[in-house]
Image (spheres, rainbow, N blue to C red):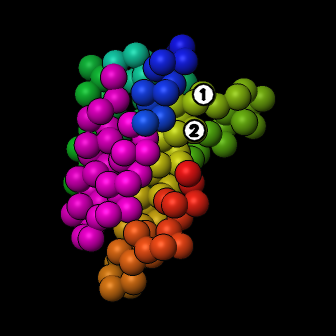
Amino acid sequence: MGAPEQLRNTTQLFKFLELLASSETLNEVLQTVQNYLNAWDRERISDLQKVDGGWAPFDWSQAPLQITSIVRLQRFRDAVRRQCHALKQAGLQPTPEIIELDEFLFIAVQLADCMKTHPSKASSAASGPNSWLLRLR
């Protein structure tokens, strides 16, 4: 992947992180994750599928699977995490695509869990002046 594609992907990632941070409901979190997966191009999906073993949230035709619940989001995130760990255990470096997916799904799951347990605090924690999103920049 060349520099222009990396810049485009980074810009796109920040756009979706901002949308995730502004989510006020669990459904908005799920929709943002779905939109993030829908935005992946075939080249990135292909690069991911070289190391995914069939578990990533994309099917054989490189279409994103539907994220219909928090449970399903958590299952995808757990599968991605396990694959990253397995690659490292085998002495292989995880690809940028799998690392990005792992981190994005981690943030989405954390936000969803926070919304489930503390609905009134979740939105302000993600978008307030001391937001984790602001610290990323």
- Looking at the image, which residue is at 51% across and 31% down? 97
Marks 1/2 in contact by CB < 8 Å: the verdict is yes
Regarding residue 132, the answer to whether it shows in the image is yes
Is 77 left, or right, of 33 in this rendering? Answer: right
Whole-percent x, y for residue 67 in the image: 27, 49
Type of amino acid under label 1: Thr
Magenta segment includes 77: no
- Looking at the image, which residue is at 50% across and 69% down? 131
Whole-percent x, y for residue 128 in the image: 43, 74
Label 1 to label 2, Cα distance in Å?
6 Å
Main SS category, magenta section: helix
- Residue 129 vertical placement versus 53 (above, below): below
Circle 2 packing at 10 Å, graded few (<14), some (14-19), many (20+), is: some
Residue stretch in magenta:
12-41
Whole-percent x, y for residue 20 in the image: 35, 57
Whole-percent x, y for residue 121 in the image: 39, 83
Q: Residue furthest right?
A: 91
Quadrant of the image occupied by residue 111: bottom left
Is 28 left, or right, of 112 in this rendering? Answer: left
Disc 1 element = loop
Circle 1 packing at 10 Å, graded few (<14), some (14-19), many (20+), is: some
Disc 2 element = helix
Q: Nearer the viewer, residue 102 or 71?
A: 102
Is 88 left, or right, of 133 in this rendering? Answer: right
Kindly identify which residue carries mark 2.
Answer: 99
Type of amino acid under label 2: Ile
Q: Nearer the viewer, residue 90 or 116?
A: 116
Quadrant of the image occupied by residue 30: bottom left
Kindly identify which residue carries mark 1.
Answer: 95
Magenta segment includes 16: yes
